[in-house]
Amino acid sequence: MGDEEWLVSAVMTVYTGAKTVVRTVYRNSKVCFEVKVGMHQGSALSPLLFMIVMETLSREFRVALPWELLYADDLVMIAETEDYLILRLNEWKDNTGNRSMRVNVNKTKVMISGEWQK
């Protein structure tokens, strides 16, 4: 996205070799393990990095505001028909899937406002 190389290097340093433990209500695990994939849960930097990645990945297939809105790790899609909504959702699934990401369809919610057109 044209960011300064030093900034990218600084972020990579934070994520390289990061280790974590499993925390429960009873205690933390005694064994730590390296985090090799994904965003660090609980990190203040993670939501920003996620949005930068989503912005970059979705530039070539998203429609634009107000029809699609990214917020944290959520996507809001607006469509005038059910068929067009399904088409757009499938485009998101296919395009993010091609980049080793996935849309969790089980968490998908649909809200109908006004008269629904088929």
Image (spheres, rainbow, N blue to C red):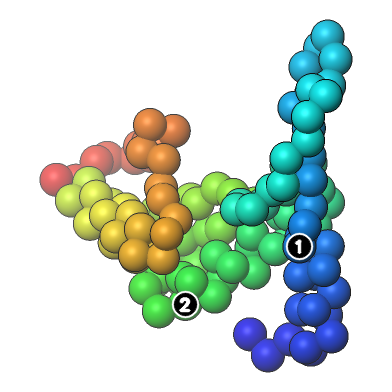
Q: Nearer the viewer, residue 117 or 97?
A: 97
Vertical comparison of 103 with 29: above or below: below
Number of residues whose C-alpha sits closer than 10 Å to that of mark 1, classed few (under 14), some (14–19) or many (20 or more): few
- Disc marking residue 16: 1
Residue 95: percent from left, percent from top: 34, 65
Residue 71 in view, yes or no: no
- Disc marking residue 59: 2
User: Which dot, 1 or 2, sits closer to the camera?
Assistant: 1
Vertical comparison of 52 with 88: above or below: below
Vertical comparison of 51 with 118: above or below: below
- Compared across the picture, whether 8 is left or right of 97 comes to right
Kindly indicate the quadrant of the structure image that contains residue 5: bottom right
Kindly indicate the quadrant of the structure image that contains residue 116: top left
- Compared across the picture, whether 14 is left or right of 106 comes to right
| Amino acid type, callout 2 | Arg
Please report the residue visible at 79 percent of the width from the left and 52 percent of the height from the top: 18
Please report the residue visible at 53 percent of the width from the left and 59 percent of the height from the top: 69
Mark 1 and mark 2 lie on one chain; the one further toward the N terminus is 1
Residue 49: percent from left, percent from top: 70, 63
